Each structure stands twice: as structure tokens, then as C-alpha cells.
Image: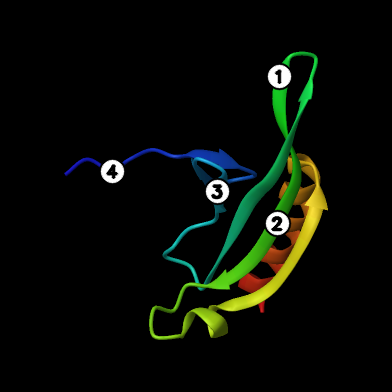
Amino acid sequence: MAEKEFSTYKGKPLVRCGDELYYGSMDEKFVIRMQIKTKKEVNGAEIADKVAIQLLATDPDLSPRKQLVKSSEKNGLYVALDIAEVWLDRALKA
């Protein structure tokens, strides 16, 4: 079976499904989930406005409540991605 190629951001997989984005690899201990809460129109293009960010443990034996390590909400996808990268790097190094 061929391995699927994903888009990457700063060397880590970035996968989008609708208004949810996952950053990082499910093979690691942690992954980031970003949910686009609201969008706005800028110059005829629809862009993410409010984005919820969650640092999640990937251990399937944990309850969903215990999988959530950290969460926040930011204005704009680029700000959310920057925070996501810092959180994920720190969590994976710990």
C-alpha cells in the first residue's frame, strides 16, 4: 500500500478536513487540533478569523478529557499555527 503524502508546515504534517486542521504526526505522543470557529471575507476571499487550538495526547487509552493537554483561541490561522508549532515542539521535547 502506498504511503499518502501530506502537506507540511515547518517539517510536520498539516492535514485539513473541512474546518479542522491537524498538525503533527499521530505516531508522536502529541498532536495539535485547530478548529476554525469563524471566517471573514477579505478582498473576496474567505479566511479564518477565530481559531481554537488544542494540544492533544495521542494515547488511545486516555479518555477524551485526559487527552486534552492545553487549549486556546486565537485570531487568524497564521497566529494559531505559530502557537501550535511552539506548543507541539515543547510537548515533544519534554
Q: Which mark is residue 52?
A: 2
- SS state under label 4: loop
Mark closest to the chain's N terminus, 4 or 1: 4
Q: Which quarter of the rendering shows the C terminus? A: bottom right
- SS state under label 2: strand
Q: Which residue, given by chain and number where applicable, does mark 4 sit on?
A: 3
Mark closest to the chain's N terminus, 3 or 4: 4
Q: Out of 26 and 92, give the one closest to the viewer.
A: 26
Q: Residue 88: horizontal and vertical position, in percent?
A: 66, 64
**6 with respect to 53 (left or right):** left
Quick one: label 1, few (<14), some, or many (20+) residues within 10 Å?
Answer: few
Q: Residue 56: horizontal and vertical position, in percent?
A: 57, 71
**27 with respect to 36 (left or right):** left
The reply to whether residue 54 is visible in this rendering is: yes
Quick one: label 3, few (<14), some, or many (20+) residues within 10 Å?
Answer: some
**Residue occupying the point 80% across, 14% down:** 43
How far is mark 4 from mark 1, CA to CA? 33 Å
